[in-house]
Image: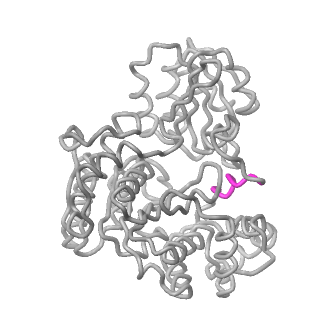
Amino acid sequence: MTYAEAIQFLYGLRWFGAKFGLENTRQLAALAGNPQEQLRFIHVAGTNGKGSTCAMLESMYRVAGLRVGLFTSPHLVSFRERIQVNRQLIAESDVVRLVENLRRTGVAPVSNLEKETAQAAQEDGDRRDACPTFFEFVTVMALRYFAEQKCDLVIWETGLGGRLDATNIVTPLASVITNIGFDHQQWLGDTLEKIAAEKAGIIKPGVPALTGVTQPGPLEVIETIARELNAPLTCVDAGHASRQTGHAALQGDHQRANAALAVATVEVLQRQIPVSKAQIRRGLEAVHWPGRLQSVTRPGGQRLLLDGAHNPAGAAVLRAALVDVESPITLILGILADKDCRTICDIFAPLAKRILLVPVASERSAQPLELEKFCRSANPQAIVTLSAGLRAALAQTADDHFVVIAGSLYLIGEAMELLGLSPVPAADEKSLNEWTPKKS
């Protein structure tokens, strides 16, 4: 098997959808030797800020001398971003080896994973339910790799939700919930309280939990679940966020809140894993997490800001970060159709004098023509243009002083490729992020 064939195998698993439940993941992990039992975890859930908080935790513990695994999703450009040890992406050869080894367990089909075959299997409920999904398979791949690498600690980000997310087969040292907002309502619930209950599903009996949630309703849900499980809960509010946590490298007020939550987690776990104040400070100063308020200056002096603000809460955070910008803002915007496009446009459009709407390189992309209505309504004074794609939009804005690219992490991944900020895989791996959820 080559790396390209391994990626094609994983791509084939996408057609089995994304099922919510832990049975398949537990079964596959058992066949892999239950590698999760050899590891220590910090489990992180939340609507926004999960990746940034994970990156900060990873950086602080790595500076403290630990060998740290990092599991996050989605990836921006390369599938290998999802599985890292000490911020080194998993090697292509290890991806091939792990895929080959796991598929030999017999849980995943060895061949015939072309789209047509998988779609036919979807109609066969028994076979569909027996086959692990892409995310379930990759979750166990990561567990096995981290165990092989003898990681001292794994920073473990949920995929979607928490309670029935494939990552929830582990018992962590701490459970962290960053915040609660509206996203994936069709799967997690149509109120903040229902979404909070799903996220709080990562809380385990007697295991410390921490949260940055401040809304009364969702916080009450989290507090109730923690109390029922006898899990000591630390609430990291605005007061915590204002204390000295060093100079975090990531920009934005929301990152200060994420930093405070990450630091509070380190403090709660001091007895198990000591980290000095100097190591905490150095870790925050050194953290790197691309595509989140990432500033880029091009050779001609043009400034770009890349941010994967893909839901209303993320859009509001980006808007707050741009409030004091004096330069005229040009916005390149691409959104997935299953997001709250109207609200996102209502938040973004008033910021810009010029808006270029582009399709996202995803089968779930919102159509620019649909976004145009929302943007014109939210900002009648803006110049709104439909572009064929991001490459064309970048060419059209080459003379603009300050350009913001936002709306979807898919779009940010494409921007990083086009701007030379990331190595480009031989084949497009961004489509591995696609999934079609199926309720269990």
Viewer-side residue, 146 vs 359: 146
Viewer-side residue, 389 vs 118: 389
Q: Find residue 164 and report its horizontal and vertical position in percent.
A: 45, 70
Number of callouts = 0
Seen in the picture, residue 285 relative to 158 is either above or below; the reply is above
Seen in the picture, residue 98 relative to 15 is either above or below; the reply is below
- Corner quadrant of residue 407: top right
Q: Find residue 332 and report its horizontal and vertical position in percent.
A: 61, 28
Seen in the picture, residue 147 relative to 358 is either above or below; the reply is below
Please say whether residue 431 is one of the residues in the magenta stretch.
yes
Colouring: one colour
Q: Residue at position x 67%, y 37% from top?
A: 420
Q: Residue at position x 80%, y 69% from top?
A: 114
Q: Is residue 384 left or right of residue 51?
A: right
Q: Find residue 14 and report its horizontal and vertical position in percent.
A: 67, 65
Please say whether residue 329 is one of the residues in the magenta stretch.
no
Q: Find residue 194 and report its horizontal and vertical position in percent.
A: 36, 58
Viewer-side residue, 82 vs 107: 82
- Corner quadrant of residue 62: bottom left
Q: Which residues are magenta?
A: 427-434
Q: Is residue 200 left or right of residue 409?
A: left
**Residue 440 shows in this picture:** no
Seen in the picture, residue 411 relative to 303 is either above or below; the reply is below
Quadrant assignment for the N terminus: bottom right
